Amino acid sequence: MARNRQFVNHKTTIRHDWKTEEVMALFALPFSDLLFRAQTTHRESFPEGEVQLSTLLSIKTGGCAENCSYCPQSAHFDTGINASKLMPTEEILKHAQQAKEAGASRFCMGAAWRSPKDRDIPQLAEIITGVKNMGLETCMTLGMLSGDQAHALKDAGLDYYNHNIDTSEEFYSEIITTRSFKDRIDTLENVRNSGMKVCCGGIVGMGESVEDRAKMLITLANLPKHPESVPINRLVKVEGTPLEHTKEVDIFDFIRTIAVARIVMPCSYVRLSAGREDMSEEAQALCFMAGANSIFYGEKLLTTPNPIQNRDMELFAKLGIKPSQSESTSHHIEQTEREEALA
Ligand code: SAM
Ligand code: DTB
Ligand code: SF4
């Protein structure tokens, strides 16, 4: 057995040594073969027909110093979004309560920051405590974090930190120039070292090649530990952003990316993330068959629309899908622990 392979159960191998050719070969499989393989992998690690629900809230909107070409919240582009300050804690907790009542298991809070200021940490800690007290898992995405900031958020009780690599290292500079790919990896390392769970994925449909998608997934899968959550976003083309007129990604290529993410990170939650608002029910069903087992749930992402809750519940009923409890209560975590024990 290769040293960097660990068997987590009789069937599932967690690998951190994926090569470009291998992953490109997965992308090149006939669609049905790829989906069959992804679904088979999925069933080795997860119960059938369960999808985890995370609700998003933008707690600090717009006016961001970064120039991410896809993002409506960058101060570099005129998208009609006004910059606002960090939302008062009470208002955030009201949104969290609504998310809980609607059936979400995790509440994800996003801030349009390059990185948080140390002076923001006490209020962020208060928010984390309030949301956790409702029995929700907590996630934040606040930009780059220093090691000390990551520890402070962990100490406050934050369960997950979302920080996406967005695309391949090679394509990254076409999309963002105000911070580097390495900056992103450094933050992920700080988050991992703090003991928080990592939520990290990217965007499909920014004009990247299939090889860029393969390399993005390889970067994630070859991290020392797979991110517990892997959001796969389909670009939401927002007026005023440089990517507004990007050619639409073929839906089967999007689904292929979900399937390959499932195969290379067999025990991670793969989230069918932004881009569901105008996605057909059939395409979403194929994403679930390809191994997606988490969604953003609620009528808004950060600033753009998402399907209303009833629509998602109707689709789940048609497909026989049930919302899963928090990730921490699923048997996937036992596997993660086993992985750690074997490491
Ligand atoms: N400012 C923080 C950061 O960039 O890390 C947190 C918020 S940022 C909006 C979180 C992620 O949302 C981005 O990394 C990107 O992957 C995703 N995102 C933003 N705008 C998007 C869009 N128009 N379509 C799809 N995904 C998008
Ligand atoms: C992620 O991967 N996607 C979410 C969340 N993490 C923070 C954000 C999607 C944002 C889509 C554009 C918007 O609504 O502003
Ligand atoms: Fe700022 Fe995050 Fe948007 Fe980039 S993705 S412009 S860092 S809010």
Image: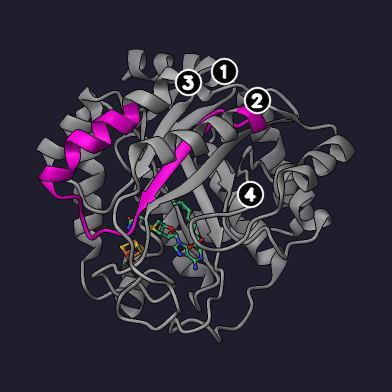
User: Where residue 183 sits: x, y (%)?
Assistant: 19, 58
Residue 330 bears which disc, if any?
Answer: 1
Vertical position of residue 289 compared to residue 61: above or below: above
Three-letter amino acid code at the position of disc 2: Ser
Q: Tell me which numbered mark, 1 or 2, is placed earlier along the sequence.
A: 2
Pointer 2 residue: 324
Mark 4 Cα within 10 Å, few/some/many (few <14, many 20+)?
many
Three-letter amino acid code at the position of disc 3: Met
Front residue (pair 222, 120): 120
Label 1, label 2: how many angstroms apart (C-alpha)?
8 Å
Q: Which residues are magenta?
A: 101-128
Vertical position of residue 213 compared to residue 170: above or below: above
Callout 1 touching callout 2 (CB < 8 Å): yes
Q: Nearer the viewer, mark 2 or mark 3?
A: 3
Label 2, label 4: how many angstroms apart (C-alpha)?
20 Å
Mark 3 element type: loop
Three-letter amino acid code at the position of disc 1: Ser
Quadrant of ligand 3 in image: bottom left
Pointer 4 residue: 259
